[in-house]
Image (spheres, rainbow, N blue to C red):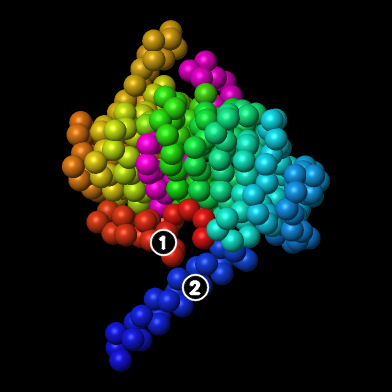
């Protein structure tokens, strides 16, 4: 009877997660809730879209709105831009976009339970691009075979949280570079003091080669993530004036979990800083120890043991990615 009770609880727990992702907007945490809150379209009208024209109409302005995406929408040959004060949420595990969704200088956006793919590198070439955006919460999305980056965050974007997302590729394009934070060594004027981003409970999976993430200028807090991409080049890279706090992550069959890097440009001589604590490395190579003095996260968070990360993040019912 006890086993049956536990099984029923587990079933209803998984069902609750599925219902929550499909119908309810999750609350933002991490940097997305620092110096303000990220509420997306809360308080606005709710609309459901299934075509490109309906999507564009629903997300292009800055009016508060919750936009439910039903099915897969091809975004066409150019980037499709979203406005401020939006929640864009997928209906079920199969909804999302082919192409490039982009925000430029927009604030207060939630993107949840969506699939992104951009195999032909249209628009900016990414699945999702954040340029100059603030207070953005990206959660429970799946990024698959995006030609340039899966999710790139650049041009002074700030106060962003990426959680419970899965990144993967189906083939090796030679540019399986996942998350670029800060696009140029020469962009100090725009990026310094910004690019504050939380990554937690994400899964970098099949054929991810590097940039998990690669950071210029930013302050990155990465905890309880799972990295399992045999044949990769590196995961974290801290370059010019950046700081990375990597806590209780799980790395399996990974080369170079973290590294520092100075580019060959005249401004790139200053490498970043890394503090790596409590991380689990299983069958990994080139594992370096870094204990630099870095920033302290200005928010509360629950730090789980690295030994439990893989099971939580890869759960088919409640783990990273869409449901």
Residue 246 visible in the picture: no
Q: Is residue 93 above or below residue 130?
A: below
Residue 306 visible in the picture: yes
Q: Is residue 201 magenta?
A: yes
Name the residue furthest bottom.
1
Q: Is residue 200 above or below residue 154?
A: below
Q: Is residue 91 above or below residue 240?
A: below
Read off the residue under disc 2: 15
On the image, which quarter does residue 133 sit in? top right
Q: Foreground residue, 304 or 180? A: 180
Residue at left offset 30%, top offset 91%: 1
Horizontally, residue 144 falls left or right of residue 231, namely right
Read off the residue under disc 1: 316
* Label 1 Cα neighbours within 10 Å, binned few <14 / some 14-19 / many ≥20: few
Q: Is residue 303 magenta?
A: no
Q: Which mark is residue 182?
A: none
On the image, which quarter does residue 123 sit in? top right
Q: Which residues are magenta?
A: 184-208
């Amino acid at each position: 009877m006890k086993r049956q009770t536990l099984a029923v609880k587990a079933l209803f727990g998984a069902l609750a997660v599925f219902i929550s992702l499909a119908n309810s907007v999750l609350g933002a945490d991490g940097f997305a809730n620092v110096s303000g809150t990220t509420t997306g379209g809360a308080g606005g009208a709710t609309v459901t879209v299934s075509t490109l024209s309906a999507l564009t109409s629903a997300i292009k302005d800055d009016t508060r709105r919750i936009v439910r995406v039903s099915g897969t929408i091809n975004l066409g040959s150019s980037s499709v831009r979203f406005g401020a004060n939006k929640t864009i949420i997928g209906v079920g595990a199969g909804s999302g976009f082919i192409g490039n969704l982009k925000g430029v200088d927009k604030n207060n956006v939630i993107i949840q339970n969506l699939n992104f793919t951009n195999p032909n590198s249209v628009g900016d070439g990414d699945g999702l691009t954040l340029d100059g955006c603030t207070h953005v919460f990206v959660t429970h999305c799946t990024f698959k075979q995006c030609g340039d980056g899966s999710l790139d965050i650049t041009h002074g974007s700030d106060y962003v949280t990426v959680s419970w997302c899965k990144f993967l590729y189906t083939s090796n394009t030679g540019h399986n570079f996942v998350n670029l934070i800060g696009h140029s060594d020469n962009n100090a004027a725009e990026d310094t003091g910004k690019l504050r981003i939380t990554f937690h409970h994400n899964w970098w999976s099949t054929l991810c080669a590097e940039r998990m993430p690669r950071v210029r200028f930013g302050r990155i807090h990465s905890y309880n993530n799972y990295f399992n991409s045999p044949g990769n080049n590196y995961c974290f890279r801290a370059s010019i004036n950046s700081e990375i706090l990597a806590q209780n992550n799980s790395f399996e069959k990974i080369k170079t979990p973290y590294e520092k890097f100075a580019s060959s440009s005249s401004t790139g001589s200053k490498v970043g800083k890394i503090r790596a604590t409590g991380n689990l490395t299983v069958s990994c190579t080139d594992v370096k120890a870094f204990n630099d003095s870095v920033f302290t996260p200005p928010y509360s968070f629950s730090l789980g043991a690295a030994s439990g990360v893989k099971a939580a993040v890869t759960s088919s019912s409640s783990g990273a990615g869409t449901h």
